[in-house]
Amino acid sequence: MQKGCTLWFTGLSGAGKSTIASKIEAILKDQGLRIEVLDGDEVRTNLSKGLGFSKEDRDTNIRRIAYVAKLLSRNGVLAVTAAISPYREIRDEARESIGDFVEVYVKCPLDELVKRDVKGLYEKAIKGEIANFTGVSDPYEEPLNPEVVVESDKETVEESVAKVLNKLAELGYIPAAVKVK
């Protein structure tokens, strides 16, 4: 029987959270494991519609994601969250609430994120055209003790995925035989 847990990706916009999460999802589904990805953008559209980007609204959004992840995890599903979740306190609250929790910090320097940003959001935020933009005009609090740190400016997606899968196997959440394609 599969043991559920929550794999919580955190990092700035454009760091690669959703990319890594979707690769992990494909690999684990191919292995017949139960996995569900709760992507930040999709959750905002479907579960947190109407919330803005104030600290209170961001916290509410993360609490909603954590609640759904907790329900999935306790029912033997690997719940994967891919949301910026900028505030350490609310991530720690999610960890405490869920229990089986693996935090993955997708680390990437701001200058690299600006280069990657096809929508030009970072550039607009730097110019002051977008308010409350995490990492520019709003804070991002790096995790203090994540189970996994991937550096998306230095690693390939496959290397990052392998790091995460290896940690999940080490912790007993997935079979050790699962390999990156």
Image: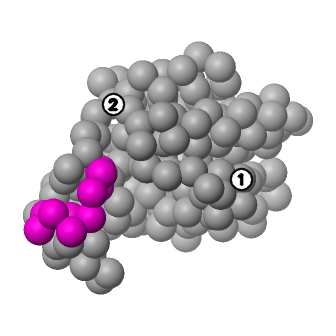
Looking at the image, residue 180 sits to the left or right of residue 173; the answer is left
Give the residue drawn at x 71%, y 53%.
Answer: 47
Secondary structure found at label 2: loop
Res 4 visible? no
> In the rendered image, which quarter contains the N terminus?
top right
On the image, the x and y values in percent for residue 104 come to 43, 41
Which residue ends up furthest to the top in the rendered image? 96
Task: Please tell me the numbered disc located at residue 116.
Answer: none
When the figure is inspected, residue 95 is found, relative to residue 168, above or below; the finding is above
On the image, the x and y values in percent for residue 62 come to 56, 39
Q: Nearer the viewer, residue 140 or 107?
A: 140
Near mark 1 (Cα within 10 A), the count class, few <14, some 14-19 or many ≥20, is: some
Residue type, numbered disc 1: Leu
* Residue 124: in magenta span: no
Q: Which residue is mark 2?
A: 143
Question: Magenta part mainly helix, strand or loop?
Answer: loop
Task: Please tell me the numbered disc located at residue 47.
Answer: 1
Colouring used for the render = one colour
On the image, the x and y values in percent for residue 63 come to 61, 33
Q: In this picture, which residue range is highlighted in magenta?
A: 125-134
Residue type, numbered disc 2: Pro
Secondary structure found at label 1: loop
How many labels sit on residues? 2
Give the residue drawn at x 74%, y 66%.
Answer: 30
Give the residue drawn at x 51%, y 41%.
Answer: 57
- Marks 1 and 2 sit apart, C-alpha to C-alpha, by 25 Å
